[in-house]
Image (cartoon, rainbow, N blue to C red):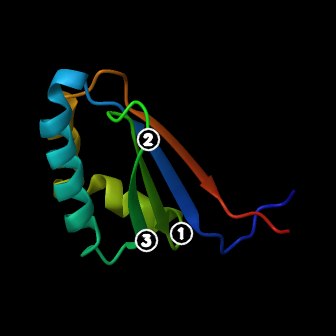
Amino acid sequence: MPVKSDANIHSIVLVDPMPDQQAQGTNVLVNFVREARQDETVRAITLIRQTDPGNHYVIDMTFAHQSAYYRFIQSPYVRGFRVALFEHLGSPWDERVGSDIIL
């Protein structure tokens, strides 16, 4: 299916803090989402916690276009978030980026 030229960009990030680091990792995630909600480049952001096991999260983000996504990931607060989260991770950073398709 063709991609729309003005398509939204979606970023889905799977985040798994180590079980013994869950409280700290969750705090870092929640603070990041609160800050991202104030960012003009972010159309929408949701933090989802998997029911079981409870230390697995999904960050679901939407951007207006590719350049908005690039501005976002290069911003100092996003870089700081990734550095702060790194010490709590039990698995590698897993991000999937995609765009809307014509239906």
Q: Name the residue rendered at 69%, 64% in the picture.
A: 100
Front disc: 2 or 3: 2
Q: Name the residue rendered at 12%, 38% in the picture.
A: 24
Pointer 1: residues within 10 angstroms few (<14), some, or many (20+)? Answer: some
For the N terminus, the quadrant is bottom right
Q: What type is the residue that disc 2 sits on?
A: Thr
Q: Name the residue rendered at 33%, 61% in the picture.
A: 72
Q: What type is the residue that disc 1 sits on?
A: His
96 vs 35: above or below? above
Which x, y percent locates residue 47? 37, 55
Which of disc 3 and disc 1 is earlier in sequence? 3
Which x, y percent locates residue 2? 84, 60
Left-right relation of 102 to 20: right
Q: Name the residue rendered at 20%, 66% in the picture.
A: 35
For the residues bearing labels 2 and 1, Cβ distance under 8 angstroms = no
5 vs 56: above or below? below
Q: Quadrant of residue 32?
A: bottom left
Residue at the disc numbered 2: 51
Which x, y percent locates residue 98? 61, 52
Tell me how far mark 2 sits from mark 1, CA to CA: 31 Å
Residue at the disc numbered 1: 65
Task: Return the residue nearer the eye: 98 or 66.
Answer: 98
